[in-house]
Image (tube, rainbow, N blue to C red):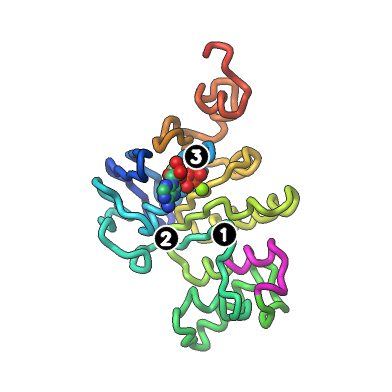
């Protein structure tokens, strides 16, 4: 077994029920501390809702959410040990790159010299050195997502949630960005939950996979197994590769 990295936290959704109108979701799942977990499933299967329940943007109708053993069910998002990156709009349009990253350190941007060193390291680490003073609109889509990742680095939380963060980027760039997430994971060892509808992303990441249908986890296990010939039937159906016995 890989030793559990310092600062990582496991995530438990203990019989978490959540309803949108006639969509009843139920999650009962554990994600290991320091793991990297891809989440796949058709549009509307509940991937974003699963992340929002962990982050605290949604509250369960019943059940509990635990992070690192602590019950966070009643905690607001800002109090949870979590960072989240969305597909877009992660940045404040009127703040520079440097300031957007600085928010990960201090919401009021009261930054110490040590904070500034961290911010500059994170910008270098994500390939953004020299772009500190730019505004989000002066960056490419890929660069904006790098800024969001730089902010994750300076926030340094035990859980990182990514909701289709690179969906609007082209394939080559997406690979680079996935590699950057993996490098950040290798360096910090936080628990990473990565929602993607791109099978190549999940394969590249390796680790474990959760497959959702209709607001439930219908298959989970090693990502490599999902993509092998003995992958879960529901997943093969989704991928259009199985179904002979269906
Ligand atoms: P995914 O991220 O897998 O595409 P979501 O978690 O966004 O799925 O949505 C799961 C289900 O909840 C869908 O059936 C969707 O229609 C419904 N839903 C999501 N957000 C809302 C909302 N704000 N109001 C009503 N229904 C919603
Ligand atoms: Mg979604």
Q: CA distance from mark 2 to mark 1?
A: 12 Å
Measured from the top left, where is residue 20 in percent x and y? 36, 45
Can residue 236 be seen in this snapshot? yes
Residue at which label 1 appears: 184
Query: Label 3: few (<14), some or many (≥20) within 10 Å?
Result: many
Give the SS element for disc 3: strand
Residue at which label 2 appears: 158
Instruction: Decide which of 88, 102 is in the foreground and name it.
Output: 88
Q: Earlier in the sequence, mark 3 or mark 1?
A: 1
**Residue 24 located left or right of residue 128:** left
Give the SS element for disc 1: helix
Q: Quadrant of residue 129?
A: bottom right
Residue at 63% of width from left, 53% of height from top?
Answer: 166
Q: CA distance from mark 3 to mark 1?
A: 17 Å
Position of the N terminus, as image quadrant, is: top left
Give the SS element for disc 2: loop
Instruction: Decide which of 212, 185 is in the foreground and name it.
Output: 212
Q: Is residue 64 above or below residue 243?
A: below
Q: Quadrant of residue 183?
A: bottom right
Residue at which label 3 appears: 208
* Circles 2 and 1: CB atoms closer than 8 Å: no
Residue at 59% of width from left, 19% of height from top?
Answer: 242
Q: Which residues are magenta?
A: 136-148
Q: Earlier in the sequence, mark 2 or mark 3?
A: 2
Query: Label 2: few (<14), some or many (≥20) within 10 Å?
Result: many
**Residue 150 located left or right of residue 1:** right
As for residue 140 lying within the magenta part, the answer is yes
Q: Is residue 149 above or below residue 31?
A: below
Q: Earlier in the sequence, mark 2 or mark 1?
A: 2
């Amino acid at each position: 077994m890989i030793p559990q990295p310092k600062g990582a936290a496991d995530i438990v959704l203990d019989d978490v029920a959540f309803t949108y109108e006639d969509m009843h979701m139920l999650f009962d799942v554990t994600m290991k501390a320091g793991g990297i977990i891809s989440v796949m499933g058709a549009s509307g299967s509940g991937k974003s809702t699963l992340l929002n329940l962990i982050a605290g943007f949604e509250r369960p109708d019943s059940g509990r959410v635990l992070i690192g053993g602590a019950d966070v069910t009643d905690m607001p998002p800002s109090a949870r040990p979590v960072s989240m990156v969305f597909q877009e709009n992660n940045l404040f349009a009127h703040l520079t790159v440097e300031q957007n990253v600085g928010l990960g350190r201090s919401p009021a941007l009261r930054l110490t010299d040590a904070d500034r060193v961290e911010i500059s390291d994170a910008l270098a680490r994500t390939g953004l050195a020299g772009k500190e003073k730019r505004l989000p609109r002066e960056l490419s889509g890929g660069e904006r997502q790098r800024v969001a990742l730089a902010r994750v680095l300076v926030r340094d939380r035990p859980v990182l949630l990514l909701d289709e963060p690179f969906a609007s980027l082209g394939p080559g760039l997406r690979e680079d960005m996935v590699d950057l997430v993996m490098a950040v994971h290798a360096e910090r060892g936080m628990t990473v939950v990565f929602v993607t509808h791109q099978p190549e992303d999940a394969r590249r990441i390796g680790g474990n996979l959760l497959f959702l249908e209709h607001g439930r986890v219908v298959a989970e296990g090693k990502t490599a197994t999902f993509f092998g010939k003995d992958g879960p039937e529901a997943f093969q159906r989704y991928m259009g590769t199985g179904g002979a016995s269906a």
